[in-house]
Structure formats: C-alpha cells, structure tokens
Image: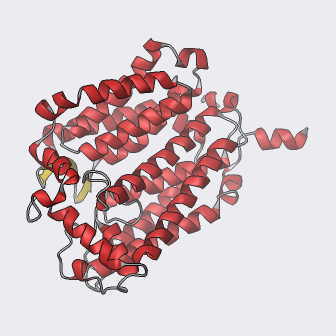
Amino acid sequence: MADIKSRTSIPSIRERFNNINWALLIIVTILSCVGFTVLYSAASGHFKPWAYAQIIRFIIGFFIMILVAISDMRLWYKYSYFLYGISLILLIAVALMGHVGMGARRWLYIGSFRLQPSEIMKIAIILILARVYAKTKIEQTRKFYHQLLVIVYITLPTILVATQPDLGTGTFIFGVGFFMLWLAGVQVWRFILAGVIGITSMPIMWMFILKGYQKNRILNFLNPERDPQNTGYHITQSKIALGSGGLSGKGFMHGTQAQLNFLPEKHTDFIFTLLGEEFGFIGCLAIISLYFIIILFALFIAIRSQNKFGRLLGGGIACSIFLYVFINTGMVMGVIPVVGIPLPLVSYGGTAMFTTLICIGLLLNVYNFRHVDDVKINNTSN
C-alpha cells in the first residue's frame, strides 16, 4: 500500500528529473542534428546564416524543454486559460501592428527577436482543450451547447491566423482542435456533419475568403504545369529535386537543385526536398521513421497516463507532430497544396523550434505525472 501511495503522489523535482525519458530526448536530438547538417548544406558548406543560429536556438530550447518536463503539471492545468488568452491577444496584436513579410502579417518584433504568435497558439489550443475536457463528463461532452463553446475556442484563433494570411497554420490549429474533440468523446456523426458543411461552403470560401495566391496554390496543386515559371515554380522544382535523389541520393552537398539555388525556401518549408535530393529515398524514410517513433512515444505516454488531462495533452501533442510532418512532406511531394508549415526540428526557424521543444517538454511532463490521478491534478490549490 505504501508503494502504491508513493507512486500516485505528486513526484518531487528530483524524481521528475530522474524519470525523464532520455530515449525520447536522444531521438529529438538526432532529428535536430539532421536539421543542422542539412542547413549547413543549404548554405553551401557554411554554418552561417542558418545552421549556427539553429544550433544556438536548440541549446536554449533544450534547457527550456527540460524545465517544462520537470515543472508541476498542475501549473499547466491551472494557467491554461491564461496562456490561451495571452496567445489570442498576441494574434490580435499581429493583426493590428504585426510585421509584414512576403505579403503576410505574421510576426511581432520584441527587441531583436521576431515572435510568431501563431506558433504559440499551437501549444495553447492543446492546453486549453485538455483543461476543458479534463473535468468534463462524457454526458456533458456530447451536449451541443458545450461543443459550441469549445468550437469558439478553436475557431477564434483559426480565423485570426487564416486572415494574416496563413492558411496552413490556421488549418493546423483547426485540425488539432477537432482531433481533441474526437479524443474527448464527441460523436462521430457530428464530425461527418461538419465535413459536409465544410465541403458545401467551399464555393463561398473560394469567392470571398481565399486570397489570390492561395487560389493559385490550389490550382497549381491540381495542375503544377499551368504556370511552371511563376506560381507553379516551387512545387515543380521540389518534384524535380526529390525525383533526382533516387534511392540513395546524390550525396551530401551534391544536390544540384539546392546548391544551384533552383529550389526556393530550401532552408525552411522545402528542407525535406533538399534532404531527399542529397540522401534519397533511404534518407527520407529514415527521417520519417524517427518522427513515427516520436508519435508512438507520445501515444504510449498518453495511454499510460492515469489522469485525463495528461491523456488529452499527450494525444494532442501526438496529433500536432503528425500534422506537422504530414502537411510538410505532403506539400513538397505535391500531395497537398503548398502551405507554410515547417518540418519540426529540421526546418530553420526560432519560434517553430521552441514550440516543438516545449511540446516535447510537455510530453515528458505527462510521462513524469503518469501515475498521478485526476483528483490530484484537478486540485490546483495544492
């Protein structure tokens, strides 16, 4: 009985640190090192401007991840509404005074640091939905008024992000939110109904909501050859680079499409293409396998959690990592339209790197608190 009581009590900081899942951290570090290597190649054998900055960000983010992992889960439970509110305010600030780059208003400058609030919202939406449903009984979950409130939580940031415009991240937030509704027990027929409504509203979205370049992306997805020198250039060059990589690739720093600068955005959204050209199908398969292992870790941790908040949090993080990888790889292969979603831990970007590492930290936190029951997690006054 004493052993059971000690396992279900709140673990100390020392216990949390000792119980960190180091196997998961090793995989995360390997993926990040792949990113540094590919960024080094993207800069034609130079650490600057991308690889060096990314290494520094990873080191800082790694320590943040450890701090999140050993923090008290009850604090994340308690302040999830606050974090969501702050993220929403930052998105509104972007709409009012954000920095415009490449035709989109997505960033806020805080000193010399460029912050992308939509990345923070990716964490906040998981936290708030896990918090909402942690205390909600299944009977309440299936009531329409309760679902309507949660849909408002999901729709507000989705609209704010989509109007930046950043349709890719908006779709990402929407997708994670609805996946968590499914995890919480919302009936499947409601998702089918939402899908039917979404499909029937597509003509309205096409005429009144989508920007011109977003329409072009969809048209180029359907027929990349319609404008190969302009709007279809990205996906055409991406397919050429991936195809030329073959089974084992052209070799490190020998990818002609990337090294001769035919491949656009090779250090951010299209970094998977550069990797495929230089390391081939085998290299791509190895990277996807590492992501698959992380997703399995996340699902395993979520299933083993004895508290509902941890189960939903772990499931939401698993979904977010899957969507990151699926959207990015599908985009560069021409399976889905081109949208601005980076490849986690590999693509260049500060806020995206920190967001992913914080998500991993939260996953490790769920692992540390997996034996703690709902009563102790929900009692935030302790």
Q: Is residue 203 above or below residue 360?
A: above
Furthest residue in direction right, as rendered: 1
Q: Residue at x 56, y 44 (%)?
A: 314
Q: Residue at x 14, y 37 (%)?
A: 96
Q: Is residue 321 above or below residue 75?
A: below
What colour scheme has been applied to the protein in the rendered image?
A: secondary structure
Residue 296, horizontal then vertical, whole percent: 59, 54
Q: Residue at x 19, y 68 (%)?
A: 264
Residue 252, horizontal then vertical, whole percent: 36, 85
Residue 234, horizontal then vertical, whole percent: 19, 63
Q: Residue at x 14, y 42 (%)?
A: 97
Please name whichever residue, 70 or 354, is drawn nearer the observer in this view of the structure. Answer: 354
Residue 231, horizontal then vertical, whole percent: 11, 57
Q: Is residue 278 above or below residue 289?
A: below
Q: Tell how many labels.
A: 0
Please name whichever residue, 324 or 191, is drawn nearer the observer in this view of the structure. Answer: 191
Q: Is residue 13 left or right of residue 237?
A: right
Q: Is residue 79 above or below residue 315?
A: above
Whether residue 158 is visible to the viewer of this picture, yes or no, is yes
